[in-house]
Image (spheres, coloured by chain):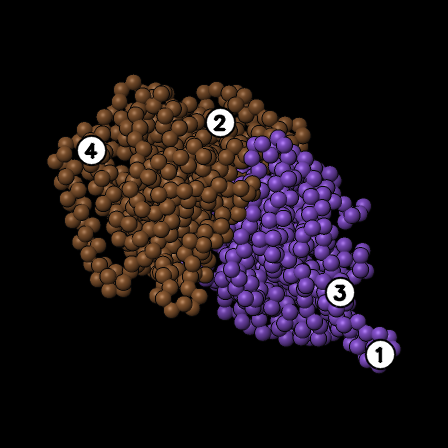
Amino acid sequence: MNYFDQKIQPVRDQRLTIIDSFCGGGCDLLDCARSGCALRQNRRFWQANACQMALTIMMASTVENAQIIMHGPIGCGQQMNGLVAQGNRGRVSRGLPMIAPRPWLSTNLKESDVIGGGEQKLREAIEFADREYRPEIIFVISTCAPNIIGDDVEEVVCRAQETTAATVVGLHCPGFKSRVVASAYDAFYHGLLRHLKFEPEPYKDFLPLDENNPEYERTMHRFQFEKRRTVNIFNATSIGAQDEQELTRLLEALGLKVRIFAEYSSLDKMRMISHAALNVSMCNVHDDYMLSFLKEKYGMPYVIAGMPLGVKATREWLLAIAKHFGLEEQANRLADAEEARVNEAIEPFLPKLRGKRVLLCGGIVRVGVEAVMLSELGMDVIGARLYHYDTGADPIIEDMADNLPDMQVAVSNQIFELVNQVNTYKPDLMVSHAGTHGWLARTGVPSVQLFNAMESRFAYNGLFTIISRMALALENPSYEKRLAAHTRLPYKESWYEKNPFSYLKS
Amino acid sequence: MATQIIHKKSFIENPRSSCALGGALITIGMMPDVIPIVHASLGCAGNLSGAISMGGGSLGSGYCGGASIPTSGITETEIVFGGADRLREQISSTLELLDAKLFVVATGCMTEMIGDDVQGVVNEFDGEPVIAVSTPSFKGDSYTGYEIVLDGIFNRYLPKIPLKDEKLVNLFGLVPAYDPFFRGDLEELARLIERLGLRANTFFTPDQTFENILSAPAASLNIVFSHVWGVPFVERFESKHRTPYWTTDLPIGAEASDRFLIELGKLMGVSEALVQSVIESENNYYYRYFERAADMFSNAGYKFYAETVTNSNYAIPITSYIERELGWVAREAFVTDQALPAQQRLLRDAFNASGLSSELIFETDTTQIAKEITNRHPQSHGERFFAAEKPVFILGSALERETAVKRGAFHLTISYPAAGRLILNRGYAGYKGGLNLFEDILGGERVPNV
Ligand code: SF4
């Protein structure tokens, strides 16, 4: 089914098989996904999480010269006040200049708008933003309320485009449509692919030449040659500048040219997307939607080959790209050399980590890949907590289930289950998603950030960083121990006697 | 002096408040042994908590906040078929799992729009400590959410107590997170009140227990440190519990604190001699520190034209401090609440009565505030003698930092969003708070820090 022509994209639950409540082994998870039991997975108790809108604005707010308009009540998008600073840190780490924080707008829907509709307010806000702030792009973020009252946000966006200087992009991400935050990736890319151009434009991006021009052939040749050697890599909020630089370094060593999209990109830069030979993903659950669109529209092939974490997955990732260019032999030589160096570098840390019981928690691809990697390095990986499961991650889960058939696999982003797991299984160390570390410290366990956009996690530099981080985390647990001893968690004592997953239902 | 800019735009730039649900969550979550149950999508409580924590000076999750908040997590199915069943299941599992003396169900916009009978579901839990409040985003901002929660707990849930405790007062008006120094302020106020031989329920500081909430109806006085927020609430409190109220300004610094103690002493029948002796010893403490900083302050020529950008609670207190303690020239006091005209009138009356010389302006948008400052204080374009009002010090939120940088003004973050600050027990109220503010203005928190 073709989703790309629709005004609004489907959420992940409609497009793929989704699980967000599960506990078992890796194989059980795959069985559940394939048997239809996935549809029935649920919980009797839920705690707060983010929604797809939250991740959508994280991505949108990094785009250059883009103005955010939150179409909703005043509470949706409050985190924008912090994203401005986060975006600036990301910019500076990518060598982009620091910018004055761009204000954002909320249409501030009130009771009367809920009854009468919010379209007029949105129109006014778009006009105002275009006039007042002169952005290149206006992102209109469509939240729950307008989707319940029936505002045709995409229609307002398209109409507004007729009179605005900025390119207006609707991002449809009402939280109630899906419990799967990763739906945000599709929301973001759907808006881009509907409203932005991905082709270089004459007299903007290149100077067209007449066929009779003596330079024509040479220029065309150079143009085509460049295109044949260029790869586009698609990033995400959890991927930092250092990761991008590390991967760029490796691919450039193979003689390729690298461009990175769509965070920290711009209207101008994104027009170059189709001027490349290959689109490359860094995660199975980020951008398959965008990559299949680019394949359909421009015939561009793509590679989705896991996440380059640790030596094995990095080699696989590199080889998948190299294969496209017939550079396997070079890629293997490069990986050999890099592995020799990084293995030597991490060696002194490994004795501290070997045999340590570690529990992993976060995005399915990262956790799946890291579980295998850390166990190969001699750690005792006692469990994997995946924030969600979707079909895109099957190759990762298959690999994890092959390598660690007996390891407990849970699909959970719920803190009460996490706290109980820590209390029951007593890991020595957690490697965990952003937002959990405060709770982990309160339960007394040291933790390392599964990702940190200000640090390195990918490929060889990333391996070294996370290994040294883990060794440091194990070094002095006084803070966690004292905090746990003096903190009361909100659960009744009886909760810790129960199975951590006893609130699952199917 | 007071004027008002009528806000013509229907939308709002960088709102300095989240929705009623956001205000409700932080208010509930800051109370001892009280846990919210959110009837909305999974995202609302998580997003709001993160944003409010950041804006409130890295306030954090606390006992059962942030990603631990129980939430019905309704999805498209409930939007179509109703969310009552999911809510019922969530309340009963919450009661099973979590330890608290009171649970407060708070609603989000989508469950109100689909018309779930939340009170009906809560009524089924007869005998259990669960109540419901209606806090959809479109009902108002976080300040409104604060009032709705107080009403629910103090005016609906708590039974009447026939006997008054003549030494006990309740403190209201400071909104958790949105008054980023609320805890330090409350602690200092309680300390001063105790020096007069009285006791205070602050409800939001670490020393408080659920007993403080239960004892609130016995208080002899409610003090509201706001002319706008919490006033209708204490009126209803009075008609149910017969506790009179006193609206006053948060006292910042010695001059304001002296006045506060004298007035409170009168209201509570404290002997004048005791009040005077407390004032004397507090002033001695305050000025022995203050005078030491005087060398730095005076030698550096720290005399400024001041602009303040705050919520309505802090407008008078902060202006009073800089005019009366520091001897600065306060020019404009921007108030960024989305106050209704009637609420604006209340604040304006209080501002006029305060005798302060700056001008009160209601404006929510950062860009508009910056423009307003520029229009009112033109800068020199190279003229030799140009009466630009310089130097300027802006005391506002983190959003004013850029405005200050552009003008070459000094800046201190004192209001919401207080992004970039970590605020624990620091407060600006009272004598100790006045010294804290002096430290922050002179010391490391100020930008640029030269
Ligand atoms: S779930 Fe809906 S209403 Fe709640 S924060 Fe997300 S978009 Fe806004």
Residue corresponding to mark 2 = B132
Q: Which mark is residue A201?
A: 3
Foreground label between 1 and 2: 1
Query: Where B104 sits versus B290, above or below?
Result: above
Badge 3 amino acid: Glu
- Could you classify mark 3 by the number of other residues whose Cα lies within 10 Å: few (under 14), some (14-19), or many (20 or more)? some
> Residue at the spot x=84%, y=81% of the render?
A214
Kind of element beneath mark 4 = helix
> Residue at the spot x=39%, y=39% of the render?
B175
- Whether residue A429 is visible here, answered yes or no, is no
Q: Quadrant of residue A102?
A: bottom right
Residue corresponding to mark 1 = A213
Q: Left of A330 or right of it: where is B334?
A: left
Kind of element beneath mark 3 = loop
Residue corresponding to mark 4 = B265
- Whether residue B325 is visible here, answered yes or no, is yes
Q: Left of A166 or right of it: where is B17?
A: left
